[in-house]
Amino acid sequence: MTWWDSADDDEPERYDESDVRVRPNPKGNKPRTKVRPEHADAVTGVVLGVDRGRYTTLVDEGLPTEREVLAARARELRKRAVVTGDRVDLVSDTTGDDGTLARIVRIQPRATLLRRSADDTDEVERIIVANADQLLVVVAAANPEPRIRLVDRYLVAAFDAGIEPLLCITKTDLADPADFLANFAGLDLPVFESANDEMPLDEIGRALVGHRTVFVGHSGVGKSTLVNALVPSADRATGVVNTVTGRGRHTSSSTVSLRLDTEDGTGWVIDTPGVRSFGLGHVNPDNILGAFSDLAVIAERCPRGCTHLPDAPDCALNEALEAGELGDSGRARLDSLQRLLTTFA
């Protein structure tokens, strides 16, 4: 007798569809597919801030239908960072009514991306803000003492991202900032000087109109105080410098976009938490030279792989300096460039 034989029948057993056993879906839902909907009905918004997995976005900016919409990130974006300044596509309930929640399904291409790393050897980048076109570096003339190298790092990050840098030096009533500012004489860098009782708010405001400007600075330099003065409704927390350590205390804990309204127009102030270090492990040094367009033309004569540092052999920039081709302004700019490039040496 073979395995298909029956005790009562010499013919093999016959099977039909009713004999097939199908395991039921325990969740009772449809199987997942890799095909994702196109979301043709999605609306576009700008991320103003992030708080514990919820994203405050602005939809229809500048239109009568402008509104803030709270959103969550779609599952397919769980491995992608959504940051302040991102332009995103939203679906589901985009009315912005209380208790509603939209869903972010796409991140639009970013024009700029300001990043930092934990240190210069860390290749893991931390995105600070997307789509900003200006970077205002806030530094104090004293209390805490200004850190030239930290400002250099901010400038490097700005040049790498293709963002225009600005500099605001606060607390000028406590110390003369001339010696500090001399370190940046070779840069085409707009500078604003601010005292506690006299802030050039109109001058700074005019420079911010029509731009998305990210504010960065060491803890305790008065960055949040300046933000509150420019945007009275901001209500950003402020602190004081520790008299023992000379360091500021972190007061801003998140990055947030704030609308700036002036007589000359509107802009956006993007306030960020204060930092004490700014790693550049992600930066391409070639982008730094590109920010010095006049020197970049001369550097085209440099040998391949030239570092452009003062001791670089056969460097066309150093040879032009020795030959007197650069002049006083060019000498200052080359000094600034080489100081910035030293961060990678």
Image: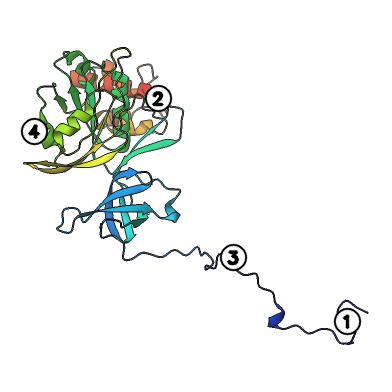
- The residue positioned 28% from the left and 38% from the top of the image is 162
Residue 113 visible in this rendered orientation of the protein: no
Would residue 257 appear left or right of 204 to someone viewing this image? right
Image disc number at residue 5: 1
Residue labelled with disc 3: 26
> From mark 1 to mark 2, how far is it between C-alphas?
81 Å
How many residues crowd around disc 2 within 10 Å: few (fewer than 14), some, or many (20 or more)?
Answer: some
Q: From the top left corner, tell me how far across and down residue 344 is, in percent.
A: 40, 25
Callout 2: SS:
helix
Residue labelled with disc 4: 202
- The residue positioned 42% from the left and 48% from the top of the image is 80
**Where, quadrant-wise, is the N terminus in this rendering?**
bottom right
- Of pointers 3 and 2, the one earlier in the residue sequence: 3
- Of pointers 1 and 4, the one earlier in the residue sequence: 1
Q: Are marks 4 and 2 in contact (CB under 8 Å)?
A: no
Labels 3, 1: front one? 3
- Of pointers 4 and 2, the one earlier in the residue sequence: 4
Labels 1, 4: front one? 1
- The residue positioned 10% from the left and 22% from the top of the image is 197
How many residues crowd around disc 3 within 10 Å: few (fewer than 14), some, or many (20 or more)?
Answer: few
Image disc number at residue 344: 2
